[in-house]
Amino acid sequence: MTDLTFTHTEASRLPAAERLAILEDPGFGKRFTDHMVSIIWDREIGWHDAEVVPYGPIPMDPASSVLHYGQEIFEGMKAYRHPNGDIVTFRPEANAKRLNESARRLALPELPVDLFVRAVNELIAIDAEWVPRGSDQSLYLRPFMISDESFLGVRAAERARFMVIASPAGPYFTGGVKPVSIWLSESHSRAGHGGTGAAKCGGNYAASLLPTRVAQEHGCAQVLFTDSNTPDTIDELGGMNLFLVRADGTLITPRLNGNILAGITRDSLIRLAKDHGREVEEREVTVSEWQAGVADGSIVEAFACGTAAVITPIARLESERGVLVDFGDQAPGELTMSLREELTGIQFGTVEDRFGWVSRVVTGGTTE
Ligand code: PLP
Ligand code: COI
């Protein structure tokens, strides 16, 4: 246990009527709660100055290393409101561990897992009224870490700042669980061997923005990236992992090959599917195999998954070559939807949490 205590500075809170109006239809990542968490690290002292403060701009020197060399990592997780009013998080230690894996790759300091969890819980507790009550709504939490040293030499920074901000969220894709079209990027890669693909760092997302714009110009919601050396081999989407479903109910997903993010939703779905006796193949998956499988009827569904996207059915795959895969009907697949219902049921407290994934942060309005 880290014995760092958090100091609190109360914000002047948004009036309840305004907050409730935002919670009616929060969208994704547009509005932020009243507070945020900040913890400072430097090489001499380690982690210190843990604070819960009013949400707002952070002081930053223009020579701050993050602004020049992009030494930044982040996490994405959600707080859910249960029918009895309890507020829970989902596998927060997994996010804490993944942040530390990203920290190692980006030469940032690791944050003790218990401190990560406490930081997130502090914010949820103080801004509990921001956790929406509507169906498929949650409070999206964005823990992140930046290098924060005023120095232009290219080396790992000696000072960093960890923060948590929170934003009420509805469905990531407008239109709810409507199947989406995705765009196969054949001219840009997101990650290469030995690169930062397995880390959750801002640079990976910056690299995905141009191909994402191309995707959107073609009416597609996300970009599918393949391996930079073997372009038929599927890695993942810009912000989600990918699964294919075979007619016999087997799930197929690219193995964690060092280039893709080890999604916590991905891992949870693999465990749920195996628990139901389904086969799950984690291996190399190719676009050709997907095309051939849909053509001969052996692959019947595809979906994207991640914290923000939850589970989103994929209807079509397109590229500069035209439509590569088309599932034809626009209805979400049966297995896709049953996995979605079970996972969200656990998160929202309507399905038994048989894996112990859910952590209670606030009990019926009172902080634990
Ligand atoms: N892959 C990428 C590139 C992502 O940004 C995300 C989202 O966090 C995921 C996969 C899914 O990860 P998780 O299920 O932990 O949210
Ligand atoms: C998440 O799902 O938490 C992510 O970070 C994905 C991002 C593209 C919103």
Image: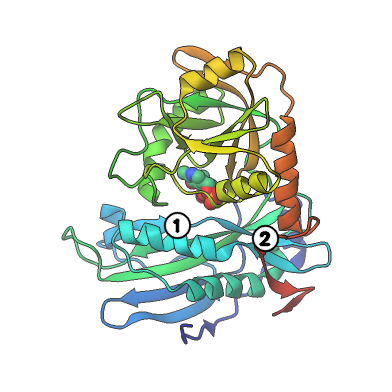
Q: Which residue is mark 2?
A: 355
Image side of residue 59 versus residue 276, left or right: left
Residue drawn where x is 51% and y is 75% of the image: 114
| Element on which disc 1 rests | strand
- Compared to residue 284, the image places residue 239 above or below, namely below
Callout 1 crowding tier (Cα within 10 Å): few <14, some 14–19, many ≥20: many
Callout 2 crowding tier (Cα within 10 Å): few <14, some 14–19, many ≥20: few
Q: Which mark is residue 175?
A: none
Residue 150 visible in the current orientation: yes
**Residue 290, percent from left and from top:** 53, 22
Q: Residue furthest left?
A: 153
Image side of residue 173 versus residue 144, left or right: right
**Res. 49 image quadrant:** bottom left
| Element on which disc 2 rests | loop
- Compared to residue 92, the image places residue 259 above or below, namely above
Q: Residue furthest right?
A: 84
Q: Is mark 1 within 8 Å of ligand 2?
A: yes
**Res. 367 image quadrant:** bottom right
Residue 25 visible in the current orientation: no
Q: Earlier in the sequence, mark 2 or mark 1?
A: 1
Cα gap from disc 2 to disc 1, whole angstroms: 25 Å
Q: Which residue is mark 1?
A: 74
**Residue 111, percent from left and from top:** 41, 71
Q: Nearer the viewer, residue 142 or 277?
A: 277
Look at the image and tell me in which quarter the C terminus lies.
bottom right
Image side of residue 51 versus residue 123, left or right: left
Q: Amino acid at mark 1?
A: Phe
